[in-house]
Amino acid sequence: MKTIKLPIFYFLTILSLGVFTIFNGCKNPAEGIKITTTSGFLKNQMLIQFVNAKESSSKQPATFELTISGKNANGIYTSGGKKQLMVYNGVITLAMLESVQPSESNPIEFNIYAKPEGFSPVSKTFVITRNEPSEHIITLVDYSDPSEGTASLVSTINLNTNGTIPETKIVIPTTPETPLKSEVKVKEGTSFISVDGDTLKGDNLKSEIVYHSTLTEGSLNTFPGGFNPANIQGPTGPLEGGGTFTTAGFFSINMKIGDKEVKSFTEPLEIKAEVADNISNPETGNPIKEGDSIPTWSLNEETGEWNFEGNAVLVKNANGKLEAQFEAAHLSAWNIDFYTGTCNSSLTVNFRLTGSTTPNQYWVRLVSANGGYLSGLYTNTSWSSPVTISNNMVEVIPRVPNQQARIVVLKNRGGSATDPNNIIAQTALFNPCSQGSIIVTIPQAPPTSPILNVDVNTLVYCQKRKNNVLYTGYFSVREKTAAASTAQNYYMVNGALSFANLKEGVTYVISTVYEGKTYNTEFAVTKNSTTLPNISGLTGTATYVPATNKLKIDVRFSTPEC
């Protein structure tokens, strides 16, 4: 067996197989071979899943292209080494090369932007500071069936013969889950301008509007770009040093005339939105009230840059509700937000599991005294997604707010951080700037059925090179009868992966995505040996090992390019 050394340019063509071992000339690649590992060509695989913000919906984002921009965009590839970033079945894995070395003092920054069919546009800025894999869930609003806490309207408005519009009030319908009213008014005689500065002409205007309230975690999770902006322009210039948005609500507004996108107007839009009553000014700690002003910000969705635009004024409307009123001179995501900096302190969070020490996924949030959402800036980036929490797990929050807050542990992303039925655990109020460390205790019910641990080994046959490699990448595992959103993701390195506490007698689906194709199979957690069905290109066996009381799963798949 010889070690094959290839130039880095070749590894760019097989990046999604990650850090792997190459071996050839062996009739049975699974037995009797000498393994030579070639590593270091792939760093920081990032699994990104785009999901419908409405957890109960069967409609999910499918195939679409990402646009990437920002300081380090040139160093980002798909995990297959391609620069065209295509999302398939709502999933993409990005990666960086060995030469990219992120750190706290030298972070890797880039922004992604996409417009999936039927969903509101999405923009997210990534700031990578560690040499380690990460996973991210980005939730999207379905225009036709918005998630709890959001309201949407797609409408077509007839234009005058000269391309202007009669006075039009676009009222976004409320729902029982989103009772807050919102509207966008277009003034009579307004003309519409393209990104190139041309006046657009046509018979009608198509508008797509989403109002995101602060009523549910599900709505807050759809906030464009995240609450910890890395690129923000304030009233007098760039805002440096880190900070956070405390939002009172935000809008995504998109308009078209024919196939041309509207960018601006000859007259600004007039926007009104009722806001929740549990919002406090983070600088004073006082609840918002009539007469207060809240800054407004617009998002350049293609670059991830937020820009200060002015102030929304709070008034009491005819329904006795607080209503934010402001004007928008151009189209983008618009955010009604307080922006605050952080103190120079960190917070160490210690998790304790009681009843059962089985690791589980939870949604962890830092919230204000009245349950208002505080930015993910105050947590490491993984906390914007469900976190697999194990007993005695420790996380350090590097920058924290100088205000009373608490940590809450939630059952699901769609519920409220103030709903007792959604809260699994919470701390007492504390000031993160002076706390230093805190213990979060999570009660868990003991397992109702016997559990087994699992070892997975994976080989990939590369048709183009006619050899086998040990796979490095993400696998997704879920109970067969459970929703796709319940899947847990595990990172495999050099063809080996272990995970714990699967229920005996239950059938699970295991899958991975490589260059646009999903490979999956299923296995039953039993103390028997079985052959795994070839459901979608992933084959193998499951063998119970009495000596270790583990289920050993060997799987493989074949791919044309690697």
Image (cartoon, grey):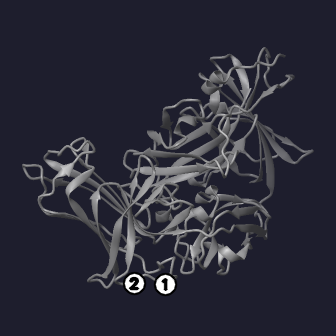
Crowding around mark 2 (Cα neighbors within 10 Å: few <14, some 14 to 19, many 20+) is some
> Who is closer to the viewer here, 38 or 401?
401
Q: Residue at x 12, y 62 (%)?
A: 188
Tell me residue 432's x, y (percent). 66, 74
Instruction: Please give left or right for residue 227 compared with residue 554 in the image.
Output: left
> Who is closer to the viewer here, 4 or 297?
297
Q: Residue furthest top?
A: 25
Reading the image, the residue beneath label 2 is 289
Relative height, residue 22 to residue 49 (above, below) = above
- The amino acid pointed to by label 1 is Asn
Q: Residue at x 38, y 52 (%)?
A: 120
Relative height, residue 194 to residue 418 (above, below) = above
Any part of residue 137 in sight: yes
Which quarter of the picture shows residue 531?
Answer: top right
- The amino acid pointed to by label 2 is Lys
Q: Residue at x 79, y 66 (%)?
A: 356
Any part of residue 479 in sight: no
Reading the image, the residue beneath label 1 is 286
Instruction: Please give left or right for residue 296 compared with residue 424 in the image.
Output: left
Tell me residue 549's x, y (percent). 87, 48
Instruction: Please give left or right for residue 546 compared with residue 215 in the image.
Output: right
Tell me residue 164's x, y (percent). 12, 53
Quarter in which the N terminus is drawn: top right
